[in-house]
Each structure stands twice: as C-alpha cells, then as structure tokens.
Image: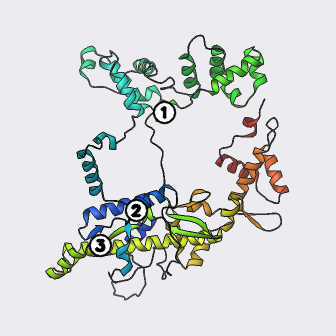
C-alpha cells in the first residue's frame, strides 16, 4: 500500500557562484582573459582599468619578469567544498581589494577602436593587423584553377584535394572517395566519378605544387621528391631504388645488406643515403603553419637574495572593477532586486571576487610546488622529487580536486624555462635501498646513458635496465621502453652508426 515517510539526508549543492568559481579556476590563462573580455563587453557594471605604466609593464614582460615586485604572502583560504572548488562567502559582497584587480588587456571594443585610430592616422592598413597563413588545400585549389580541366576531371581533383591530411598525405583509399556526382556534365556525358578518374586526378594533384603532396605512403612521398630532381643529380637513381625497395633497411641502418642488394660501393651508398635524408617526409606541414602555439605563464618564479619568490604574472591579473557611477545610479533608481540589471550587478561582483580567488589559489599552489621542488630549480630535472596532488592539497587545506583544477593548463615561468604545473608531479619509483625516486629522474638517467653510449654499439633497453639496476633504480624493461619513447629516442637498432 502507498505510504508517506520522512527521510533526512545531507547533500552538497553548488550555487551558481561556486559553479563560476570552479569554471574560472580550471581555465587556462588565455581562456581566462577571453572570459574577462566577454564580461567587460557585455556587463555594463564592469569597467576596464588600464595599467598605470603600460610601457613599463610591456618592457618588463619582454624581459620575462613582467614587472614583478617582492612576493607577498597569500592570505589563508577557508575550507573549500569537497569535490567542488574554492570557498566562497554566501553573500554577494565584494572585498574592498577586489575592485583594484584587473585583466592586463583591453576589451575587444577598445582593441577595435585602437586599430581604427591607427588606420585613420595613416599608421597602417587594415591588412597589416591580420596575418592569415595559406593552408595546404587553399594553395592546391588556387593552383588547380590555372589548369584547363573541365567537368568531372576538375571535380575529381577537388575531391582528392579535400581528402588530403594536413601533412599532405592521402590516407584514404580511392575506392572510398567514389561517390555519385549529380552535375550537368555527368548527365550530359553519362560519366561517373569512378576510381580510374580519381587515380588520374591524384596524379594531377601530385604535380600541382610541392613534390610529395598527395603521396599515399612515405616511400611514395620520397620517390616523388626524387623524381622531381634534375636528371643529372648525383646518385639520383640509387636514391630512388633505396626509397622504393630498401626504406626499412635504411631506417635500421643495415648498410652492408643494402650495399649487397644494390650492388654499389660504400661511397655511393653513403651519398645516396645522405640525399634521401635531406628529403621532407611531411611536405604538407610547410603550408598554413602558424607562428606556433604559445602559453602565458600564470606565475613567475625568480631567485631574490637566495630565496625563490613566486608572483602572479601581471599580464593575467584581472584589471576589472565595478563601475561606481553606474552602480550608484542603479542603487538610487530603486529597481527591484530581481530585475535583469540587479542580476548583472551581482554577476559582476561574483566575477571580480572569483577572479581574485582564482589568482590567489594558483599563487598558493605555485608557492607550495616551489617549496617542495626547490632542488629542481638548483640542479635540474634529475632532482625532481615524487609528489602527488594529495600532498599539496593536505598542506594547503584544499580539496584534491581544487588542486587538480589549479594545476591543469597552468604554467610557471622559471629561470630554467616555462613548465606546466603537472610537470612537477612525477610518479614515485622504488630504489634498491628502499628509498624512492621520481620517474622524471629516471628519464634523465636514461637520456644521459644514451648520450654517452658508443654509436657503433648502442645500449638496448635490456642493457639500460641493467645499468639502472646498478645505480639502485628498479624498473622493468617495458618501463624503460616507454620512457625512451616518451623522449622520442629511437631504439638501439635505429641509433647504431655504420
């Protein structure tokens, strides 16, 4: 029979403010800046605060110090929500110091205005502000327009171009590209886009631009590049036979077997192999390549009077504050607390406080990492100690999930370079004496052994395992293989010199 029962239980629910705090904490520095730009453009109660000395900060940032001053101790954080994120107050109040925090960047509207002012002042053209690299497919389509192809021949070439990978290879079977094409030419001539037509189109695409584009394998890619060389190129024919018949032997450096199979002398073989090694295995990568992805460090570490000081990068500090005039006008208007403007004012206060808490949490985590891995900054990666997220969480009084969000996609600028926070959390490995060492230190040892090996008798993974055992580090052979592959070091057969 139906019955009514009372049941008491507890559960944790994230308020919208806590959800925003969690989301901001796990964003990278560039994503965080974009979030602030959008808020500055859409929320009328937020205003951008320009830095007091833009030129000075720009010069400092160019030097890698970004104008950091003496690091101050971060205030203690309250207990955070387990599994959720940073602690927040229940009310919507804004701390007095939060209004002075800001993002070191203009909003998109201010950036557009500066661009227009530069153009109007005759300082440059609009195209000077935009640099769009030409992609591989765009380059090939432009070259295809110059050929006198019509109907399905042109369509087939276009299909092949669109099927190319970014590195220029065609890794799909031509049979997979066959599809019914409903065009006027196909209806008039009763022609179809079959595999034979695609094969001819592929050959056309391979001649459009850089040699090697449109290859279906590494061997074909290198052969196309050798075919495009002048006929009088020394050892051209021998190099062509190597890439078509003995490419695997070349990779294994089996010079004696190749010399016997090709029937040539050692000097000619060496010159032909040198010619092959000068070829480009991925010609498509030469197109549409950006200047390279870059990261903005969240914290900056430098040594001051023998101490390692950690500071928040001024380039990512949120330079936004509540617009006092608009806030006062809204307060005097007597609008209802549930009106859209009241909600925007509350969101502006939440954003400023959460941005402040984000920087504070990242700074505290960075300081804890530097304190625990101090030997790394003095001696390098071989001195990295094993460390877990739980160790930092227990020391700072935070939840492990909070530390995980504070270290994901976050970077630290140090005198040794820029490193991701996750780099300082290597796994723990046991030693023969009962102690522990980090996996990063083992990788450094493997790299040093390989660098010091005899090129004519390289160390195999089994030998590397035994050498590590002699130094007191117990690892399996498959672990050594995994670490070697992580460092992109070839196997012993590939490292052997003739």
Q: Secondary structure at mark 3?
A: helix
User: Marks 1 and 3, how far apart in space?
Assistant: 46 Å
* Residue 301 visible: yes
Residue 380 percent across, percent down from the top left = 68, 59
* Residue hosting label 1: 286
- Residue at figure coordinates x 46%, y 43% from the top left: 291
Residue 315 percent across, percent down from the top left = 43, 62
In this rendered view, identify the residue nearer to me: 182 or 469: 469
Instruction: Give the number of the disc on residue 27.
Output: none
- Residue at figure coordinates x 76%, y 45% from the top left: 450
User: Marks 1 and 2, how far apart in space?
Assistant: 32 Å
Q: Are marks 1 and 2 in contact (CB under 8 Å)?
A: no
Q: Quadrant of residue 180?
A: top left
User: Marks 3 and 2, how far apart in space?
Assistant: 16 Å
Is the residue 291 above or below the residue 440 in the image? above
In the image: residue 8, left or right of residue 277: left
Instruction: Give the number of the disc on residue 347.
Output: 3
Q: Count the marks.
A: 3
Q: Which image quarter is the C terminus in?
A: top right
Residue 374 percent across, percent down from the top left = 66, 68
Q: Earlier in the sequence, mark 1 or mark 2?
A: 2
Q: Secondary structure at mark 1?
A: helix
Q: Earlier in the sequence, mark 3 or mark 2?
A: 2
Q: Secondary structure at mark 2?
A: helix
Q: Are marks 3 and 2 in contact (CB under 8 Å)?
A: no
In this rendered view, identify the residue nearer to me: 275 or 127: 127
Outermost residue to the left: 333
Q: Earlier in the sequence, mark 1 or mark 3?
A: 1
* Residue hosting label 2: 32
- Residue at figure coordinates x 57%, y 71% from the top left: 367
Residue 403 percent across, percent down from the top left = 53, 70
């Amino acid at each position: 029979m139906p019955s009514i029962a009372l049941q008491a239980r507890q559960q944790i629910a994230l308020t919208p403010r806590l959800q925003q705090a969690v989301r901001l904490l796990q964003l990278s520095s560039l994503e965080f800046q974009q979030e602030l730009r959008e808020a500055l453009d859409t929320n009328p109660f937020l205003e951008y605060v320009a830095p007091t000395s833009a030129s000075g900060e720009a010069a400092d940032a160019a030097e890698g110090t970004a104008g950091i001053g003496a690091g101050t101790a971060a205030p203690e954080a309250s207990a955070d929500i387990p599994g959720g994120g940073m602690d927040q107050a229940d009310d919507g109040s804004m701390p007095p110091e939060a209004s002075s925090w800001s993002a070191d960047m203009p909003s998109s509207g201010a950036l557009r205005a500066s661009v227009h002012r530069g153009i109007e002042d005759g300082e440059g053209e609009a195209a000077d502000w935009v640099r769009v690299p030409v992609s591989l497919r765009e380059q090939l389509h432009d070259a295809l327009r110059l050929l006198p192809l019509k109907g399905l021949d042109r369509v087939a070439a276009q299909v092949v171009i669109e099927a190319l990978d970014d590195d220029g290879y065609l890794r799909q079977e031509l049979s997979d590209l066959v599809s019914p094409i409903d065009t006027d030419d196909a209806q008039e001539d009763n022609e179809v886009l079959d595999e034979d037509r695609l094969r001819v189109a592929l050959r056309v695409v391979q001649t459009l631009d850089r040699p090697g584009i449109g290859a279906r394998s590494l061997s074909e890619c290198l052969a196309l590049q050798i075919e495009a060389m002048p006929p009088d190129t020394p050892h051209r024919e021998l190099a062509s036979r190597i890439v078509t018949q003995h490419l695997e032997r070349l990779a294994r450096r089996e010079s004696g077997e190749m010399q016997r199979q090709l029937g040539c002398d050692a000097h000619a073989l060496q010159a032909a192999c040198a010619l092959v090694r000068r070829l480009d295995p991925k010609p498509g990568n030469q197109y549409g390549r950006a200047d390279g992805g870059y990261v903005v460090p969240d914290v900056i570490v430098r040594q001051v009077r023998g101490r390692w000081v950690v500071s928040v990068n001024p380039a990512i500090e949120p330079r936004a504050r509540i617009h006092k005039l608009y806030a006062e006008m809204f307060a005097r208007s007597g609008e209802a607390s549930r009106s859209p403007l009241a909600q925007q004012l509350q969101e502006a206060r939440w954003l400023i406080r959460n941005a402040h808490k984000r920087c504070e949490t990242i700074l505290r985590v960075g300081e804890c990492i530097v304190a625990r891995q101090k030997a790394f900054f003095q001696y390098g990666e071989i001195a990295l100690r094993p460390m877990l997220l739980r160790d930092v969480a227990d020391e700072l009084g935070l939840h492990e999930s909070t530390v995980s969000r504070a270290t994901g996609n976050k970077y630290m600028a140090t005198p040794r370079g820029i490193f991701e926070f996750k780099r300082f959390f290597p796994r723990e490995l046991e030693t023969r004496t009962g102690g522990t060492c980090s996996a990063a230190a083992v990788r450094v040892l493997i790299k040093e052994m390989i660098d010091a090996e005899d090129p004519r008798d390289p160390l195999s993974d089994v030998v590397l395992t035994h050498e590590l055992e002699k130094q007191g580090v117990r690892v399996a052979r498959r672990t050594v293989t995994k670490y070697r592959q992580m460092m992109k070091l070839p196997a012993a057969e590939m490292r052997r010199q003739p």
